[in-house]
Amino acid sequence: MVRSHPVAGARSVWAIAAIGVLALAPAYAARADDPPPTDKSAYSLLDPTPEDQLRSLCTDRPGKSTAPCTVDVGWWQLESDIYNVTLQRVAGVATTTQLFTNPTLKLGVTSALDLEAAITPFEEVSVDDHGIVTRAEGVGDLYLRAKQALIGDDAGDIGIAISPYIKIPTASRSIGDGAVEEGVVAPIRLSLPHGWQLLFDPELDLLADSVGDGRHLNAIGLANLSHPVSKTITVSAELWVARNLDPEAPTTEVSADVNATWIPPRQPNLQFDAGINFGLDRATPGEQLFVGISRRFR
């Protein structure tokens, strides 16, 4: 069996993203038939965007992707798993991780910037090591994030944003690593013919070493292809690759993910979703299944 080099998988996704943006961005920016973006700069937290000028509901769910869209100024958006379970089995040791909701709360603070906070209020990790079962449970870590749209938030065939985050270690050491960590994602969206959307999510994280007080890089590449199958249902498939450069135990994770969303008729501010992720190597959990909900409100 031929084994691929672990860094090559991550580099390939990053290379696809770079080539796609460099090749397509000038052509997309030059299109003369794109509608002019709506000027929303006059709106603020005290004078929110009118409902009839809201963007179409856009979330960072489902799947692992981050979209380049932001929440309209003065509006809140809640995105959450209803239930999420991850299954992993390595050398006869089975690990089951369950999230009982996993909310992210967003607030649009300008016409192109939102602030976000995410935390799992109750998480359970169960490990079955050849019949000996141990459990850990409690609150997860707190993630604080900002997302700044650079282009394409309201109109156009290309969208680019920048989204830095910081993790505050609110979880116990039995669930989290007890370290402050940070990173940045640069989502890039391209609109393709016939309603297809292509999304790239290059990401760099600065994580704590598993041993000692050092820090190391974690590089992630993601490619997501989505298409509406009706006026209310959209399906997507994505390839996700992460290369963790922990000096004690460098690892590569790869998954193929399939997701679907449904926005009920006459409910443009509500979305339901579901998905399943399949691990493609031994380091990646075998399956992850989830259902979720998103709601925009003021």
Image (spheres, rainbow, N blue to C red):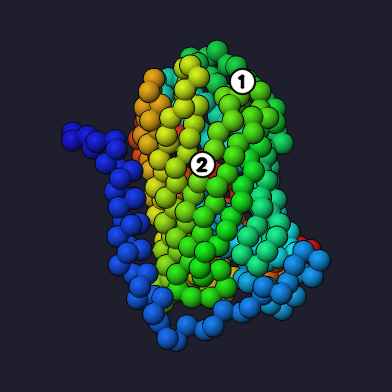
Separation (CA) of disc 1 from disc 2: 23 Å
Residue 199 percent location from the top left of the image: 43, 60
In front of the other: 76 or 265: 76
Which comes sooner in the sequence, label 1 or label 2? Answer: 1
Specify whether 35 is left or right of 105. left
- According to the image, label 1 marks what residue? 174
Residue 298: assigned label? none
Locate residue 184, reporting x and y percent.
Answer: 50, 46
Residue on which the image places disc 2: 183
- Quarter of the image for residue 200 reads bottom left
Give how far across and how far down residue 117 sits, in percent. Answer: 68, 46
What amino acid type should be assigned to the residue bearing mark 1? Ser
**Residue shown at 55% from the left, 62% from the top:** 149
Q: Which quarter of the figure has residue 179?
A: top right
Query: Seen from this angle, which residue lies furthest right?
Result: 46
- In the displayed structure, 79 sits above or below 243; it is below
Q: Position of residue 135 (x, y in %)?
A: 63, 20
The residue shown at (55%, 13%) is 132
Q: Which quadrant does the C terminus fall into? A: bottom right
SS type, badge 2: strand
